[in-house]
Image (tube, rainbow, N blue to C red):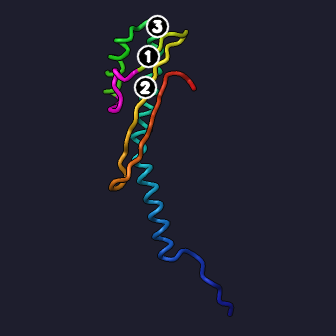
């Protein structure tokens, strides 16, 4: 009878792989709201740029952003933070903001976001 050597993960290997997988999941769960907010801001800026091309004044664009951000639960940016450029043929609306997401204890992720209505 031939005795084959066993293969597989030891208990220590399972613990290490499990802790790494848990850490990756924590990072993923913490970053999803930031990405959702970024996508909502980018979508709102696109809609506002189209409204601005139709002649909507800057003050009304800022108010419209504030109304839309309440609907989409955007807390990091307000209408006063928008940079609206009507100098070219198309209106370009930019905003720049940072978002800090706590991970564990004193470890945090810092996101520097720059959504724009201009297609880059």
Instruction: Give neighbour class at mark 1: few <14, some 14-19, many 20+ (Cα, 10 Å).
Output: many
Q: Position of residue 59 (x, y in %)?
A: 34, 12
Closer mark to the observer between disc 3 and disc 1: 1
Q: Is residue 25 placed above or below 81 in the rendered structure? A: below
Q: Secondary structure at mark 1?
A: strand
Provide the major secondary structure of the magenta segment: loop
First in sequence: mark 3 vs mark 2: 3
Confirm whether the magenta stretch covers residue 76.
yes
* Residue 89, picture quadrant: top right
Q: Nearer the viewer, residue 101 or 36?
A: 101
Closer mark to the observer between disc 3 and disc 2: 2
Q: Position of residue 43 (x, y in %)?
A: 45, 26
Q: Which residue is identified by label 1?
A: 84
Boundaries of the magenta span: 72-82
Q: Residue at x 49, y 17 (%)?
A: 92
Q: Are marks 3 and 1 in contact (CB under 8 Å)?
A: no
Q: Residue at x 43, y 40 (%)?
A: 111
The alpha-carbon separation of the residues under discs 1 and 2 comes to 9 Å
Q: Residue at x 38, y 14 (%)?
A: 61
In the image: residue 26, left or right of residue 17: left
In the image: residue 87, left or right of residue 79: right
Q: Residue at x 42, y 23 (%)?
A: 44
Quadrant placement of the N terminus:
bottom right
Q: Secondary structure at mark 3?
A: loop
């Amino acid at each position: 009878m031939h005795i084959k050597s066993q293969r597989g993960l030891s208990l220590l290997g399972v613990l290490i792989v499990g802790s790494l997988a848990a850490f990756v999941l924590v990072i993923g769960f913490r970053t999803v709201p930031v990405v959702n907010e970024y996508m909502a801001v980018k979508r709102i800026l696109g809609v506002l740029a189209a409204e601005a091309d139709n002649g909507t004044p800057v003050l009304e664009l800022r108010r419209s952003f504030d109304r839309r951000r309440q609907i989409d639960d955007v807390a990091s940016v307000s209408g006063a933070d928008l940079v609206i450029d009507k100098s070219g043929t198309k209106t370009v609306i930019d905003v720049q903001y940072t978002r800090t997401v706590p991970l564990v204890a004193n470890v945090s992720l810092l996101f520097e976001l720059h959504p724009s209505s201009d297609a880059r």
